[in-house]
Image (spheres, rainbow, N blue to C red):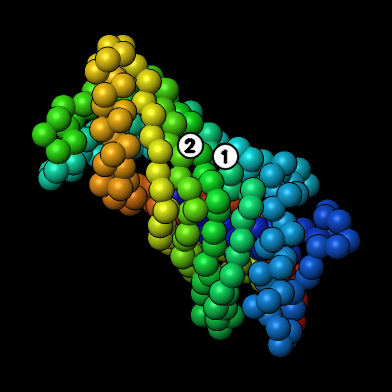
């Protein structure tokens, strides 16, 4: 469920240094320690991004608000239709660690690893289908909390010209998510039957890895779309050479 959090954070920091405290790092392409510079810049950006950057119209990401995410029905041991609305994602900037940048400025491909100790999703949900042999249905409030989330992240960019200046936009964002542990809670399962609901929530958590594997791809796709937009909101305003000076 991530987003290249660290790389996106670093991009925004570099793009808006005039609006940020003087202790934020600027990373030059010629820096022989570029990887370490990006790692540190991304780390320092988290606190400021939690509240957004008004000067560049970047909304707060603590929490990150997502309108809608759906998971279509699969045909296997998990056969669920899931719909999430009014999503609030907490924890993207808390305890974030970014490492292992691999940067290709010729092809504009940026790769990194990131770690979040806890990411929590709160949303209005609708669910219908079955998990293993058990039917499940309901609608109400849902919480999905992922612990020790590791992710691998890749941005693909391209340059374009606007008003005589060269800019960059993100064409595609790919993320692969790997949480160590997941806890789920769905309120109002089975029309509010507390006994059945409690039993099903226990069953869901006992099989949380299986359920998450079915949800992984829509999570990754949704976050890729959201963070591509955030990054491009910055890149569309700041020339490439000011974001990544030589």
Tell me which corner region of the image, top left, top right, bottom left or bottom right, holds residue 140: top left
151 with respect to 187 (left or right): right
- Circles 2 and 1: CB distance less than 8 Å? yes
184 with respect to 74 (left or right): right
Identify the residue at horizontal 81%, vertical 63% (top origin).
24
Image quadrant holding the C terminus, namely bottom right
On the image, the x and y values in percent for residue 234 come to 67, 55
On the image, the x and y values in percent for residue 137 come to 23, 23
Residue 120: tell me if it is visible.
Answer: yes
Query: Relative to 82, is 193 above or below?
Result: above
The residue beneath circle 1 is 90
Identify the residue at horizontal 41%, vertical 48% (top origin).
181
- Mark 2 secondary-structure assignment: strand
Query: Relative to 221, is 25 above or below?
Result: below
Tell me which corner region of the image, top left, top right, bottom left or bottom right, holds residue 62: top right
Q: Earlier in the sequence, mark 2 or mark 1?
A: 1
Residue 158: tell me if it is visible.
Answer: no
The residue beneath circle 2 is 121
Mark identifier at residue 81: none
- Residue lying farthest to the right in this orientation: 22
- Mark 1 secondary-structure assignment: strand
Identify the residue at horizontal 64%, vertical 78% (top origin).
35
| Number of other residues with Cα within 10 Å of mark 1, as a class: few under 14, some 14 to 19, many 20 or more | some
């Amino acid at each position: 469920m991530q987003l290249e959090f660290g790389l996106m954070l670093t991009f925004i920091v570099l793009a808006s240094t005039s609006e940020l405290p003087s202790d934020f790092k600027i990373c030059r392409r010629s820096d022989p320690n570029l990887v370490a510079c990006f790692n540190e810049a991304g780390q320092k950006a988290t606190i400021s991004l939690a509240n957004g950057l008004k000067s560049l119209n970047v909304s707060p990401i603590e929490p990150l608000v997502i309108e809608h995410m759906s998971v279509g029905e699969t045909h296997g041991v998990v056969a669920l239709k899931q719909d999430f609305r009014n999503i609030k994602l907490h924890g993207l900037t808390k305890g974030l660690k970014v490492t292992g940048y691999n940067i290709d400025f010729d092809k504009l491909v940026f790769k990194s690893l990131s770690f979040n100790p806890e990411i929590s999703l709160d949303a209005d949900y609708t669910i219908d289908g079955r998990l293993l042999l058990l039917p499940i249905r309901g609608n109400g409030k849902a919480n999905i909390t992922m612990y020790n989330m590791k992710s691998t992240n890749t941005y693909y960019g391209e340059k374009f010209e606007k008003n005589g200046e060269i800019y960059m936009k993100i064409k595609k964002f790919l993320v692969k998510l790997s949480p160590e542990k997941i806890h789920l809670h769905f309120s109002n399962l089975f029309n509010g039957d507390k006994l059945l609901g409690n039993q099903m929530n226990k069953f869901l958590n006992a099989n949380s890895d299986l359920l998450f594997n079915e949800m992984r791809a829509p999570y990754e796709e949704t976050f890729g779309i959201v963070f591509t937009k955030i990054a491009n909101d910055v890149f569309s305003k700041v020339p490439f050479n000011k974001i990544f000076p030589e």
